[in-house]
Image (cartoon, grey):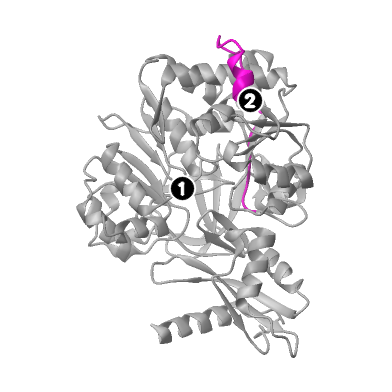
C-alpha cells in the first residue's frame, strides 16, 4: 500500500503535467481575461501552499461558494493536490440549505467568489467555519489570492491517497441531513483519465452551466487534452450564441431545456456555429422531436450522455446515432459505456430480458464510495457491488438503453434536483396549509416542472404567489413551484397515499385544455 500511495498520481497532477507541456498556450478565458497554461499552473501551486499555511491538510474539507471563475478551478485543484476533499455548493440553493451542507461536511475552509461575499456572510452566520478565504479583496475573511502571491510556484507534491475522498457532491439541498455523494481520488482519476478519442481539432470548451456539476469535469478533460476553456457566468442564450461565434467554440454541454432556449433564440439562425464539433446534452429527459431539430440546426455534432452522480457515466448516444429519421433511437440513452455493466432487474432482483422494463442497476469502477455519513442509505442503493439507480428502463436487442421513468421521487430541474418530500414538508409548515403533494409535470419540450397541489385551511386566503415566495426565501429558486393548484382534497391510492399519478394526469389535462 505505501508503494502504491507513492506512485499514485491524481487527476490534478496529470492535468498540471499537460499544462506544463505548453505554458504559453491559452488555457482559460473569462470576461475577456485570458489565462495561459503556465499562469494557471503557477496559481495552483501557490494556492496549495497558501491553503497548507492556513492549516488545511489531507482529509480536511474545502467548500467552494463560487461562480465560473478560472480561480474556482485553480482552488479545487489546489485543495485536491493537498489531499483535501472538495465540496462545491450549488449557488441557487438558499443560504439555509447551503449552511446545512457546510456544517454537515465539516468544512475546514470556505473559499468564496468575491461576488458571493454577502451570501457567504449569511452561510457562515448559520454555520461558522474555521477559515473563510476569498478569491480577491473583500470585507469578509482573508484574500486568498494575495496570500498566494507571496508563495512559491514550485511544484507542490500531492498528499492525496487513492482511497481518500476527493469530492463530495450533493444531489440537492436537504432539511436535516444533506445527501452527499463521495468519490475517491482513484475514481476521479479513472473518470478523468486519458480523454476519450480526440478528433483532429484544437478543443475549445464553452462552460455556461455551473462548474459544480458536469461542466467542471468536462473542463478538466479539455485542459488535459491541451484545449482551452471559455467560462461564462451563467446561461443566457444570446450570450452563448455570441460566444460560440466569437471564440470558435468546438465543445459545449447543455441540459435539454437550455438547448431548446438556444435553438429558439432569434439570433440562432444567423449565428455561425460551424466550429462546433461536439454538443453534449443530458441531465434530464429530452424530446426526440426537438433533438431532431437540433441536429438539423447544428449538424451531426450532438451527443447524449446518461449518468448519475452516484454511478458516474452509464451510457452515451453518439453523434452517429442522432438520426432525425429515427425518433425511437433519439428516445434512447444510447449504448452502455465500455467498462460499465448494466442489468435491468425486477423487484425481486432478477435480470430481465431485452425489451422488459425494470430498475436499471449499474456496476463499474466509478460507483460512489457511499453517501457521506449515511451508511443505511448507502446500503439501500449499493448492494453486492451494484448500484440501484432508481431509474426504470429497458435494453433493446441492439444494446441501446432507454429510460422510461423513475422510482426515486425526485424532480430533475435546471440547476439540480428537487426532492418532493422536502418541499411538501416546507409547504405543510405554513399555518394556512393543511396538506400538499408535489410532483413533476413535463411540458411540451419534455422539461420537468415542479407542481404542487395544496389543501388550504378552511377560510384561508393564502395564494400561490405567497407560497412560492416562501419557498424561494426558505429553499432557493430551484425549489420554487412552477404552478400551485388548490384542491379540496388530495386523491388517494388504494394504500391511502396521495395519488400523484392522478394529480399529474389532471395537470397535463389542464395544460392541454389551455393549449
Image position, residue 475 (x, y; %) = 67, 59
Magenta region, residue range: 144-172
Between the C-alphas of marks 1 and 2, the distance is 24 Å
Asked if residue 254 lies left or right of residue 424, the reply is left
**Residue 181 makes an appearance in the image:** no
Image position, residue 30 (x, y; %) = 42, 34
Q: Which residue is mark 2?
A: 144
Mark 1: secondary structure? loop
**Residue displayed at 29% across by 29% down:** 202
**Residue displayed at 75% across by 21% down:** 55
Mark 2: secondary structure? helix
Quarter holding residue 365: top right
Which circle marks residue 234 in the picture?
A: 1
Q: Are marks 1 and 2 in contact (CB under 8 Å)?
A: no
- Judge whether 49 appears above or below 105 on screen: above
Image position, residue 32 (x, y; %) = 38, 33
**Residue displayed at 55% across by 12% down:** 153
Quadrant placement of the N terminus: top right
Front-most of 40 and 295? 40
Asked if residue 215 lies left or right of residue 290, the reply is right
Amino acid at each position: 500500500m505505501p508503494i502504491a500511495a507513492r506512485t499514485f498520481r491524481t487527476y490534478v497532477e496529470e492535468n498540471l503535467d499537460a499544462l506544463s507541456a505548453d505554458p504559453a498556450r491559452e488555457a482559460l478565458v473569462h470576461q475577456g481575461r485570458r489565462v495561459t497554461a503556465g499562469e494557471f499552473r503557477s496559481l495552483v501551486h501557490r494556492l496549495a501552499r497558501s491553503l497548507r499555511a492556513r492549516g488545511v491538510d489531507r482529509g480536511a474539507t474545502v467548500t467552494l461558494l463560487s461562480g465560473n471563475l478560472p480561480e474556482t478551478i485553480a482552488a479545487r485543484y489546489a485543495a485536491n493536490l493537498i489531499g483535501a476533499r472538495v465540496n462545491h455548493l450549488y449557488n441557487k440553493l438558499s443560504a439555509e440549505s447551503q449552511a446545512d451542507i457546510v456544517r454537515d461536511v465539516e468544512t475546514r475552509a470556505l473559499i468564496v467568489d468575491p461576488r458571493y461575499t454577502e451570501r457567504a456572510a449569511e452561510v457562515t452566520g448559520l454555520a461558522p467555519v474555521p477559515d473563510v478565504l476569498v478569491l480577491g479583496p473583500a470585507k469578509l475573511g482573508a484574500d486568498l489570492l494575495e496570500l498566494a502571491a507571496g508563495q512559491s510556484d514550485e511544484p507542490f507534491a500531492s498528499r492525496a491517497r487513492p482511497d481518500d475522498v476527493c469530492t463530495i457532491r450533493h444531489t440537492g439541498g436537504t432539511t436535516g441531513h444533506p445527501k452527499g455523494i463521495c468519490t475517491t481520488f482513484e475514481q476521479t482519476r479513472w473518470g478523468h483519465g486519458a480523454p476519450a478519442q480526440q478528433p483532429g481539432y484544437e478543443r475549445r470548451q464553452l462552460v455556461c452551466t455551473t462548474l459544480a456539476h458536469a461542466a467542471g469535469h468536462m473542463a478538466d478533460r479539455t485542459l488535459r487534452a491541451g484545449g482551452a476553456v471559455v467560462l461564462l457566468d451563467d446561461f443566457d442564450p444570446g450570450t452563448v450564441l455570441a460566444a460560440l461565434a466569437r471564440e470558435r467554440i468546438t465543445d459545449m454541454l447543455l441540459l435539454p431545456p437550455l438547448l431548446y432556449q438556444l435553438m429558439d433564440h432569434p439570433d440562432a439562425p444567423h449565428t455561425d456555429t460551424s466550429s462546433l464539433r461536439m454538443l453534449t446534452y443530458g441531465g434530464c429527459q429530452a424530446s426526440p422531436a426537438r433533438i431532431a431539430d437540433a441536429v438539423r440546426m447544428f449538424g451531426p455534432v450532438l451527443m447524449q450522455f446518461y449518468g448519475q452522480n452516484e454511478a458516474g457515466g452509464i451510457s452515451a448516444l453518439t453523434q452517429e446515432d442522432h438520426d432525425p429519421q429515427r425518433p425511437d433511437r433519439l428516445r434512447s440513452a444510447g449504448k452502455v459505456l465500455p467498462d460499465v455493466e448494466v442489468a435491468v432487474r425486477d423487484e425481486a432482483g432478477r435480470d430481465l430480458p431485452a425489451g422488459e422494463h425494470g430498475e436499471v442497476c449499474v456496476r463499474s469502477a466509478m460507483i460512489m464510495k457511499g453517501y457521506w455519513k449515511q451508511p443505511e442509505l448507502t446500503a439501500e442503493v449499493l448492494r453486492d457491488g451494484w448500484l440501484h439507480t432508481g431509474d426504470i428502463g429497458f435494453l433493446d436487442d441492439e444494446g441501446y438503453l432507454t429510460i422510461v421513468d423513475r422510482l426515486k421521487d425526485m424532480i430533475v430541474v435546471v440547476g439540480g434536483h428537487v426532492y418532493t418530500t422536502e418541499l411538501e414538508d416546507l409547504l405543510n409548515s405554513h399555518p394556512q396549509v393543511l396538506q400538499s403533494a408535489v410532483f413533476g409535470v413535463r411540458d411540451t419540450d419534455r422539461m420537468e416542472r415542479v407542481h404542487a397541489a395544496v389543501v388550504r385551511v378552511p377560510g384561508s386566503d393564502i395564494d400561490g404567489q405567497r407560497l412560492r415566495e416562501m419557498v424561494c426565501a426558505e429553499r432557493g429558486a430551484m425549489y420554487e413551484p412552477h404552478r400551485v393548484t388548490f384542491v379540496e382534497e388530495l386523491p388517494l391510492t388504494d394504500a391511502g397515499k396521495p395519488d400523484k399519478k392522478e394529480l399529474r394526469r389532471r395537470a397535463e389535462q389542464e395544460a392541454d385544455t389551455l393549449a
